[in-house]
Image (cartoon, rainbow, N blue to C red):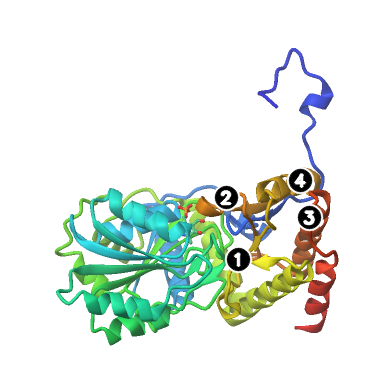
Amino acid sequence: MGPYDYRNSKLSDIVTYRSGRHFLQLPGPTNVPDRVLRAMARPTIDHRGPDFPALTRAVLDGLRRVFGTEQSVFIYPSAGNGGWEAALVNTLSPGDRVMVFEHGFFAAGWARVAERLELAVTVVPGDWHDAVDPATVEQRLREDASHEIRAVLMVHNETSTGVTSDVAAVRRAMDAASHPALLMVDAVSSLGSMEYRHDEWGVDVTVSGSQKGLMLPPGLGFNAVGARAMARTGRAKLPRSYWDWNAMRQFNEDGFFPYTPATNLLFGLREALAMLEEEGLDRVFRRHARHAAATRAAVSGWELTPFAREETRRSNTITAVEMPEGVDADAVRRVILDRFDMSLGGGLGALKGRVIRIGHLGDFNDLMLAGTLSGIEMGLRLAGVPHRDGGVGVALDYLASHE
Ligand code: PLP
């Protein structure tokens, strides 16, 4: 429908209301809880005024707990892409080599950002069905005897495939190779939903964003930064201004930001962090694991195949489901959107048209999952996708019998 034409309108042209809540079952942005919406719906305050430092400190302290770090965390008014760029420009110089373990669309995206910044990028292509292989990391780093590689880039939870990699194992592989490269990890679709331990796992920079496990609208990008990465800023020569960690740290120490922050998103972030703490992070992680298991139960009930090959590497936040040969996954999603008002993730890059991606993360409960899976099962039927009916029932059995 085009813009509303006041002179020639018929009621049927302007009535677009669909009753009930839209099901936003993308693997991000996720459903924003009412408490967070209400927390943001208040007047913006002076970001240089006396009330601001308490807000800054609350969100930075809360984020540290979610990242599993006692070191620096920085918040940008940005997308996750900004977090990727910030990680690179603060630590590297033009022509520096980075090695990207590319197991999906987002790892490839981070590699592209590095290329545009005129870094020398070695992409180690992986099978998108699988996780990053620590043995390959170790071998590739051992081959780099002159330590030309300055940073290793990986995605913890590949949102395009639904595969989770073992960050701690990659760190061990780097240590086994005695390689000094920084370890940079994208935790955009795992932070706040799955266990993440920036310090304990020896990550140098973790990148994330607001719109997934943190239950906020899009608009905030994050970096958690360890001491080794912070120390690299002194000799990192890539141009940077907006993303500069040192300016950010200097202002944050007094509770402020070097430029106008996204104040109302920070109100929302404070509330979201309080909610995660009220539920308890361990319980949040268990909830996500349980919903992922129930989703996989439905997929096997439908006799369809999760894109992630290894059971132990299947993501707790997103399940990508392969559509049978000859089925256009995007047509299935269209039917589900039209008939049931539910948005699912589509295939990205090479997976376009081949998978549907079910987001089961953020502010989510059993009945929301039951509704999500019901919409998918009806959609499979309506779109004529070869499958066995009854996957929803299998998932409900799982939910009813597992606390
Ligand atoms: N990394 C991962 C794993 C993602 O899932 C996404 C977005 O979905 C991004 C990075 C990019 O985030 P943004 O679109 O906010 O830049």
Q: Earlier in the sequence, mark 1 or mark 2?
A: 1
Inter-mark Cα distance, 1 to 4: 21 Å
Closer to the camera in the image, 19 or 383: 383
Residue on which the image places disc 1: 307
User: Which mark lies nearer to you, 1 or 4?
Assistant: 1
Quarter of image, res 154: bottom left
CA–CA distance between discs 1 and 2? 13 Å
Secondary structure, mark 2, is: loop
Compute the Cα span from label 4 to label 3: 9 Å
Q: Earlier in the sequence, mark 3 or mark 1?
A: 1
Q: What residue is drawn where x is 79% and y is 42%?
A: 18
- Tell me if label 1 and label 2 are in contact, CB under 8 Å: no
Query: Residue lying farthest front?
Result: 325
Spatial CA distance of label 3 from label 1 is 17 Å
Q: Residue at x 57, y 78 (%)?
A: 281
Residue type of the residue flagged with mark 2: Lys
Q: Position of residue 190 (x, y in %)?
A: 52, 69
Tell me the kind of residue under disc 4. Answer: Val
Q: Relative to 136, is 55 above or below?
A: above
Q: Kindly check if marks 3 and 1 are in contact, taking CB atoms under 8 A apart as contact.
A: no
Dot 3: element: helix
| Pointer 4 residue | 335
Which is closer to the viewer, label 4 or label 3? 3
Identify residue for label 2: 352
> Where the N terminus falls, by quadrant?
top right
Q: Residues within 10 Å of mark 2 (few under 14, many from 20)?
A: few
Quarter placement of the C terminus: bottom right
* Precedes in sequence: disc 2 or disc 4: 4
Amino acid under disc 1: Phe
